[in-house]
């Protein structure tokens, strides 16, 4: 007890700090809808970002524009700021300087749910929820058909994973996806992002848990998806092999972005 109580007290104080923290990313007083004529663009205009009380920028003076139908690769080493970069698009954080624009409009002018409904996210750490494959895929879009699920699984190279499971789409998924391997979780997470048919797909190291051949197939299929359906796909990775699969390649070194020749 003498060991457990001090630990519990420290943990409780930390939890209380989180609960008391005010949310900094909120809806604007008067949300705006984008002009229909400028749909299909993501633009960074001299964007810099620093975490609160960090003292220095994680990324500095970044400018680029992605048009619909393009696959963009952002390459950089661990800690270079590439994950921070894509987290600014769905407004997980607000920029310190500059503007992030989606469909020609500053993301801070959107109602947050409207902005995030446009975006499919493949996180760096693939997480599955307790339930079934079907319930995991339907997360965010419960009215889609089984055909749409199968199509998303096929693009993500996950169809064979699901077909081998007992129950297939109704196969049980343990909390955290413990009954799936790292690569299987990654592929199902990619399928989940594609399933809602978003305008923009943000993928943070989407092939990290996959072998080389499957990595290339996934990226190639994502690129085909962008071209055929006029979507924007932004992939951040440390893998230089993926640069040949993208339409535009940018490199981040110590928070600074440069165009990388293919």
Image (cartoon, helix red, strand yellow):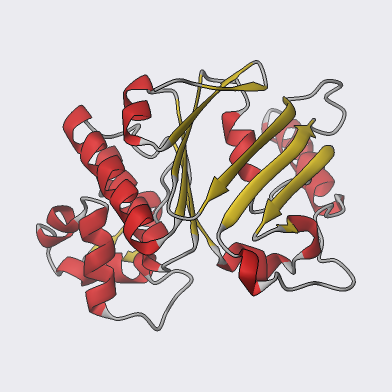
Which of 139 and 77 lies nearest the eye of the viewer?
77
Of the 4 image quadrants, the one containing the C terminus is: top left
| Point 49% across, 55% down: residue | 68
Which of the two residues, 172 or 258, is positioned nearer the viewer here?
258
Residue 22: x %, y % from top left: 87, 53
- Above or below residue 239? Residue 38 is below
**Residue 122 x/y as whole percent:** 45, 48
User: Is residue 60 left or right of 77 when viewed as pictured?
Assistant: right
The residue shown at (70%, 69%) is 34
Quarter holding residue 235: top left
Q: Position of residue 138 (x, y in %)?
A: 39, 72
Which residue is painted at 38% across and 23% down in the image? 239
Q: How many numbered discs?
A: 0
The extreme bottom residue here reads 143
In the picture as drawn, the residue positioned furthest to the front comes out as: 37
- Would you identify the image quadrant in which residue 215 lies? top left
| Residue located at (76% from left, 56% from top) | 106
Splitting the image into 4 quarters, where does residue 32 fall? bottom right
Q: Is residue 95 visible?
A: no
Quadrant location of the N terminus in the rendered image: top right
Residue 212 visible at all: yes
């Amino acid at each position: 007890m003498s060991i457990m109580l001090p630990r519990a007290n420290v943990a409780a104080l930390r939890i209380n700090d989180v609960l008391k923290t005010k949310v900094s990313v909120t809806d604007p007083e008067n949300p705006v809808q984008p002009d229909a004529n400028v749909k299909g663009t993501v633009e960074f205009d001299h964007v810099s970002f620093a975490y609160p009380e960090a003292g220095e920028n994680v990324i500095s003076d970044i400018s680029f524009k992605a048009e619909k139908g393009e696959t963009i690769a952002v390459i950089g080493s661990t800690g270079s700021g590439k994950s921070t970069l894509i987290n600014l698009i769905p407004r997980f954080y607000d920029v310190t300087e500059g503007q992030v624009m989606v469909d020609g409009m500053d993301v801070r002018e959107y109602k947050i749910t409207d902005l995030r409904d446009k975006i499919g996210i493949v996180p760096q750490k693939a997480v599955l929820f307790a339930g079934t494959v079907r319930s995991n895929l339907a997360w965010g879009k419960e009215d889609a058909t089984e055909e749409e699920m199968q199509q998303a699984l096929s693009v993500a190279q996950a169809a064979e994973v699901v077909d081998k499971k007992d129950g297939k789409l109704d196969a049980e998924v343990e909390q955290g996806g413990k009954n799936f391997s790292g690569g299987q979780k990654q592929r199902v997470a990619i399928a989940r992002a594609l399933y809602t048919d978003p305008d923009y797909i943000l993928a943070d190291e989407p092939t990290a848990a996959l072998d080389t051949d499957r990595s290339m197939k996934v990226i190639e299929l994502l690129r085909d998806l962008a071209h055929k359906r006029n979507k924007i796909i932004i992939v951040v990775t440390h893998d230089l092999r993926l640069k040949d699969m993208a339409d535009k390649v940018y490199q981040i070194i110590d928070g600074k972005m440069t165009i990388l020749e293919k």
